[in-house]
Image (cartoon, grey):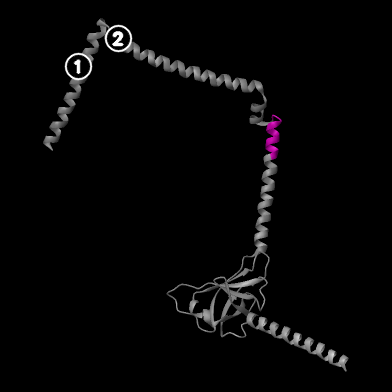
């Protein structure tokens, strides 16, 4: 008798635990599916849903506010996604809102993120269609990255070949860097150019000093004074002619 009672108690506890686990599971799933909340529906069209599944989360402002209710292929270029959202967020979503597909973390499940839209626009109604923003095509990104990597590899190879030729003394730059005689000739040319410039500068300075000395010489002093008087007279005449011309006008 005691054995039968013990078995019944164990069976009762097992059944109670099973029912409890079942109720908790139903509650969690129901909460995720918004079975216990008042909801409304929005639609968005995409060209590619990138692995999005029915039941995935819909977020608004980073908060879970609904789920993907259904995904339907309308034609070869359009896929319609039906969103079931909590009624409490309806007043924040405008008709120009955008639904975009993202990832929950770096490698997480796909999710829908709904933007609020702009203030001047009216609030959405149940069953409205909002704009869908297609996700980034990772295949195209990988293809572009591969092309960039290939170009970088070719560039690196060519650069290495050029450096090797320079090191081996090939080409004008290589010969210049590796041939001591060429380097010395170039250095000599540069030094000669510097000396020539210095000579010209000294010659100009000497010419200026000679002119000053000539002006001070008593034999040429009268000549330079005559030239200075003529220059002053010419300047005065031009100024007077210009002034008379202004008066006539």
On residue 115, which mark appears?
A: none
Asked if residue 53 is positioned above or below residue 199 in the image, the reply reads: below
Chain-order first, disc 1 or disc 2: 2
Taking the magenta stretch, the answer to whether it contains residue 167 is yes
Residue depth check, mark 1 versus mark 2: number of the one nearer the observer: 2
**For mark 2, what is the residue?**
214
Residue 117 coordinates in the image, percent (x, y): 49, 73
Q: What's the magenta region?
A: 160-169
> Spatial distance from mark 1 to mark 2, Cα to Cα?
17 Å
Answer few, some or many: residues within 10 Å of disc 1's Cα (few below 14, many 20 plus, some between 14 and 19): few
Residue 123 coordinates in the image, percent (x, y): 47, 79
The residue at 50%/17% (across/down) is 195
Say which of 211 and 123 sits in front: 123
Say which of 115 and 36 sits in front: 36
Residue 24 coordinates in the image, percent (x, y): 69, 83
Mark 1 element type? helix
**For mark 1, what is the residue?**
229
Q: Which image quadrant: the C terminus?
A: top left
Asked if residue 247 is positioned above or below residue 132 in the image, the reply reads: above
The residue at 22%/16% (across/down) is 228
> In this image, 198 relative to 231: left or right?
right
User: Image quarter for residue 122?
Assistant: bottom left
């Amino acid at each position: 008798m005691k054995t039968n009672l013990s078995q019944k108690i164990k069976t009762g506890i097992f059944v109670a635990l099973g029912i409890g686990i079942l109720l908790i599971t139903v509650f969690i799933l129901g909460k995720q599916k918004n079975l216990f909340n008042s909801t409304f529906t929005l639609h968005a069209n995409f060209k590619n849903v990138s692995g999005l599944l029915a039941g995935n989360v819909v977020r608004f402002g980073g908060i879970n506010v609904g789920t993907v209710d259904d995904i339907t292929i309308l034609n070869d270029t359009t896929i319609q996604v039906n969103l079931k959202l909590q009624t409490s967020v309806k007043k924040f979503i405008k008709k120009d809102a955008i639904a975009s597909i993202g990832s929950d973390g770096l490698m997480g499940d796909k999710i829908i993120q709904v933007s609020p839209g702009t203030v001047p626009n009216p609030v959405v109604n149940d069953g409205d269609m909002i704009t869908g923003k297609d996700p980034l095509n990772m295949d195209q990104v990988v293809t572009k990255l591969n092309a960039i990597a290939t170009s970088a590899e070719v560039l690196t190879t060519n650069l290495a070949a050029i450096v090797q030729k320079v090191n081996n003394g090939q080409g004008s730059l290589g010969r210049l860097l590796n041939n001591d005689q060429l380097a010395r000739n170039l250095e000599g040319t540069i030094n000669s150019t510097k000396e020539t410039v210095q000579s010209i500068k000294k010659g100009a300075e000497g010419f200026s000093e000679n002119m000053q000395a000539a002006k001070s010489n008593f034999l040429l002093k009268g000549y330079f004074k005559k030239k200075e008087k003529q220059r002053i007279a010419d300047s005065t005449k031009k100024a007077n002619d210009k002034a008379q011309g202004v008066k006539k006008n």
